[in-house]
Image (tube, rainbow, N blue to C red):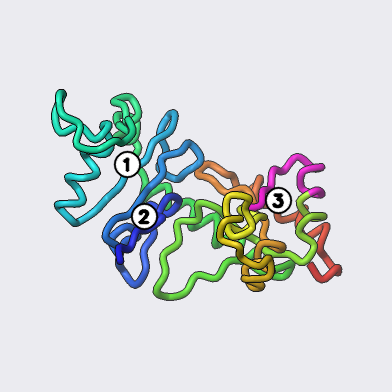
Amino acid sequence: LYVIEDAAQAVGASLRGRRVGSFGHAACFSFNPLKNLHALGDGGAVVTGDEALHRRILQARSHGLADRERCEFFSYNCRLDELQAALLRVQLPHIDARTAERRALAQRYDTLLATYGEVPIERVSEFCVYQTYVFKSERRDALQRHLRENGVEALVHYATLIHEQPAARVLTCPSDLLPRARRHADRILSLPIFPGLTHAQQDHVAALVGEFLRGRGG
């Protein structure tokens, strides 16, 4: 079996001192504008230590062409254009500093919010890059409405589990297949976090959360 890492949102993260993207036969990273390392439009990358797989991926990104005249297998046109690559190269040296800023903001959220609900847990062996900051509350939907009514965007990543998606009907999985995952999905709420978020803005978010959940068993 091949192990393919979905590292789309985790550039810079590590486990037990080993970087995400180095565990499997290959790993996929996203450069969507919402990701920590992002292009101006969109893009992505595959990394691998397998030379044969590397050659296959290089060919697959360009219609399966071995050269301009010979197509060895049908594929897509998935080349990253030069403009996106140039922007990514400019940003790459700053990713560690931006990650440090995200981590500092996350730790500050932990302090501000711990009494109102469940904050993320980062174990000793983990290094999280906080592409999202996921707070958990028993009154998630009402809390989300309260934040939005006060000008704070808070999103759910993600409310529908993979086996519940219409595309997964072919798997014929029972709806109660993963009760723990379902419980998490019903409680999670992503609060604003990004490089440049000020402490005043963060305090405002935390104050709204506390205002709504204080004394209500959030």
Circle 3 residue: 205
Cβ atoms under marks 1 and 2 closer than 8 Å: no
Magenta span covers which residues?
145-156
Considering only order in the chain, which callout, 3 or 1, is on the residue closer to the N terminus? Answer: 1
Mark positioned earlier in the residue sequence (2 or 3): 2
Residue 124: x %, y % from top left = 43, 75
Inter-mark Cα distance, 1 to 3: 29 Å
Q: Say whether residue 4 is left or right of residue 218.
A: left
Question: Which residue matches tag 1?
Answer: 92
Residue reaching furthest to the right = 216
Q: Position of residue 54 (x, y in %)?
A: 19, 48
Q: Amino acid at mark 2?
A: Gly
Q: Residue 207 magenta-drawn? A: no
- Separation (CA) of disc 1 from disc 2: 11 Å
Dot 1 amino acid type: Leu
Residue 159 falls in image quadrant: bottom right
Check the picture and name the quadrant holding the C terminus: bottom right
In depth, the one of 140 and 59 nearer the eye is 59
Identify which residue, 178 or 68, lies in the foreground: 68
Distance CA(mark 2)–CA(mark 3) = 26 Å
Q: Which residue is mark 2?
A: 12
